[in-house]
Image: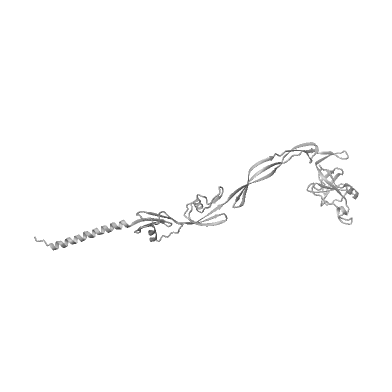
């Protein structure tokens, strides 16, 4: 058999080229695999998986058009070499408004919670200052933090302490009258008041401490229970109550009543009765009109008139004679409210 060496040589060359090509492909595939890196990038939009031939972190961010501002933070150094399987985490700065001390301060930060934000902004808190949201609150998105400055002051104040009266009934004293047996005296205490201010404005007061400087001393008074008296005529008369009143006198003249005899209302009382001895003017809030009275030094009387100056515990007694009015002047008298039905006008 005759061998064609020329044909054999041609076949061998073809096979050799094929083997070389396969080796080249495997080599290229190995080199490709060696220089390609699969990494993940965590950003505000989520997690992104990328394959890259870039060498550094900065390069791959630029390749994927990921831009950062100085306040943003990244989990690796920008110049660090990329490694297959590397995870790059980007924390984006948020705009935080801090309202404190009358000012609004805006900072961009990646701080995770309120406390960290305030520390970064170098805002110091007092022990009782308030912060909203709370210091442990997580920062989610743009946030406003309000700092309320709280101040407490102690103010001293003295306050009178009222005394009480021990009340005793006395049957030798007219009903309605009171007699002081022993005068009481007020005490004194010192209050320590805690005043709370928020941002310079007072918001609350509360008593922190009380100290008694002087104890009050109780008094003793007697209340009358006697309901009868003996009149100037020696008659025993029952009464409902007695009053100590300031008494004056009046008559029907123009000087007393402001009316001349030709006036249609001359000598007519407020109740409609004509004046006469025994008619007296009172304050209806103290003694109702129509009440029968006995006035010490004057005798029996009927409350049937009023007067502009007759207010409170005052009584004006009618006399016919201007000289009797002048002589009477002003004095303190005991007035008995008689225990009988009122006069019907």
- For residue 13, which quarter of the picture? bottom left
Residue ID at (17%, 60%): 12
- Residue 334 lies, in percent from the top left, at 83, 42
- Residue 282 lies, in percent from the top left, at 82, 48
- For residue 239, which quarter of the picture? top right
Give the position of the N terminus as an image quadrant. Answer: bottom left
**Residue 62 vs residue 97: left or right?**
left
Residue ID at (26%, 58%): 27
- For residue 331, which quarter of the picture? top right
Direction left: furthest residue: 1
- Residue 177 lies, in percent from the top left, at 79, 41
Q: Is residue 321 visible?
A: no
Direction front: furthest residue: 79
Residue ID at (31%, 56%): 34
**Residue 155 vs residue 333: left or right?**
left
Q: Is residue 106 visible?
A: yes
**Count of numbered tags:** 0
- Residue 263 lies, in percent from the top left, at 87, 56
Q: Is residue 142 above or below residue 162?
A: below
Considering depth in this image, is 325 or 84 the residue closer to the camera? 84
**Residue 252 vs residue 197: left or right?**
right
Considering depth in this image, is 134 or 295 the residue closer to the camera? 134
Residue ID at (21%, 60%): 18
Colouring convention used in this rendered image of the protein: one colour
């Amino acid at each position: 058999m005759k061998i064609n060496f020329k044909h054999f040589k041609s076949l061998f060359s073809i096979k050799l080229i094929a083997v070389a090509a396969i080796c080249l492909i495997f080599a290229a595939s190995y080199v490709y695999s060696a220089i390609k890196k699969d990494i993940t990038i965590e950003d505000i939009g989520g997690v992104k998986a990328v394959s890259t031939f870039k060498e550094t972190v900065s390069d791959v961010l630029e390749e994927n058009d990921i831009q950062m501002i100085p306040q943003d933070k990244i989990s690796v150094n920008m110049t660090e070499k990329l490694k297959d399987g590397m995870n790059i985490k980007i924390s984006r700065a948020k705009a935080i408004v801090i309202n404190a001390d009358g000012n609004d301060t805006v900072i961009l930060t990646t701080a995770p919670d309120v406390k960290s934000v305030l520390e970064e902004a170098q805002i110091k808190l007092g022990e009782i200052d308030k912060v909203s949201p709370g210091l442990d609150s997580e920062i989610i998105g743009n946030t406003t933090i309000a700092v309320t400055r709280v101040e407490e002051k102690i103010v001293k104040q003295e306050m009178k302490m009222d005394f009480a009266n021990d009340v005793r009934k006395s049957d030798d004293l007219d009903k309605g009258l009171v007699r002081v047996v022993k005068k009481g005296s007020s005490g004194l205490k010192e209050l320590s008041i805690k005043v709370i201010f928020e941002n310079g404005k007072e918001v609350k007061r509360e008593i922190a401490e009380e100290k008694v400087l002087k104890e009050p001393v109780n008094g003793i008074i007697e209340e009358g229970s006697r309901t009868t008296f003996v009149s100037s005529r020696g008659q025993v008369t029952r009464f409902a109550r007695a009053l100590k009143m300031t008494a004056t006198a009046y008559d029907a003249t123009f000087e007393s009543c402001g009316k001349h005899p030709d006036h249609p209302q001359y000598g007519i009382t407020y109740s409609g009765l004509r004046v006469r001895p025994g008619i007296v003017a009172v304050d209806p809030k103290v003694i109702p009109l129509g009440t029968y009275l006995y006035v010490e030094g004057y005798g029996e009387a009927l409350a049937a008139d009023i007067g502009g100056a007759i207010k409170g515990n005052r009584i004006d007694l009618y006399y016919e004679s201007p000289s009797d009015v002048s002589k009477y002047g002003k004095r303190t008298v005991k007035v008995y409210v008689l225990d009988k039905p009122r006069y019907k006008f």
